[in-house]
Image (cartoon, rainbow, N blue to C red):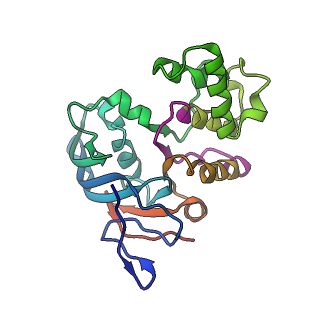
Amino acid sequence: MNSQAPVMNGQQTPAVGQPYTRNEAACHDLSFRIRDLNLWYGKNQALNNLNIDLFQKNVTALIGPSGCGKSTFLRCLNRMNDLIPSVRVEGLVEMDGLDVNAPKMDEVALRRRVGMVFQKPNPFPKSIFENIAYAPRMHDLVSRKAEQEELVEKALRDAGLWNEVKDKLHEPGTSLSGGQQQRLCIARAIAVQPDVILMDEPTSALDPISTATIEDLMDKLKEKFTIITVTHNMQQAARVADYTAFFHLGKSLSTTTLK
């Protein structure tokens, strides 16, 4: 499915609420289509009639003040809000023409296709090797030891971590530095071959050098994956985003990249 914003005066001009870009190389193939999305935590409405398109193999940055619904929206894309008993969702979240909130949707399969990297690095209490190999093994993506070793190396290389950990794969993932742990979590996410990676402020707890490393990594990963990231850092959005969407009071307002 293709979705492309109209062009006026050489610039893309989106409908109200839609993100758009000044990056001429940005892909406009649709990844997610969201229409009239509302979400409540009990009686408190966090998302209000949100309409937005998200495009494939780009970095889309969600920006806006704290408490405006960015992280809540991010979790709607792989139904992680389902884990909160008080949540009620209405509206359409469509991926590849399928409503992710449909009763027949396989949530485990959805979360394999739409991976998540959280604000605070959260490696499993396992070895570096097992942090990567465990989920692919559970999803029957690999079985033989040689296949697992190949997959682990590829995921760690893609996450820019292989050279730093190749000699200590059987040490705990928690023994790594904060920046390394976050790249391990990214490697863990991409090991199950997702289509989309969600990142909820992935660098907010990191030092400037680790932040720059993650930002460079995002630029490389978008060649293979759609990346949707929440950030409070406008300069970071300018550096990494192909598309931006500004959130305010549970709504998405029209915006442009800062490049």
Along the horizontal axis of the image, is 8 left or right of 227?
A: left
Residue furthest to the bottom in view is: 9
- Residue located 57% across and 23% down the image: 124
Residue 202 belongs to magenta span: yes
In which quarter of the view is residue 52 placed?
bottom left
- Identify the magenta region: 189-211
In which quarter of the view is residue 233 placed?
bottom right
In x, y percent, where is residue 95? 32, 46
Q: Which quarter of the image is occupied by the N terminus? A: bottom left
Along the horizontal axis of the image, is 32 left or right of 120?
A: left
In x, y percent, where is residue 259? 57, 71
Whether 193 is drawn above or below 51: the answer is above
Whether 157 is drawn above or below 203: the answer is above
- Residue located 47% across and 61% down the image: 27
Residue 73 belongs to magenta span: no
In x, y percent, where is residue 67? 39, 53
In x, y percent, where is residue 99? 25, 43
Residue furthest to the top in view is: 144
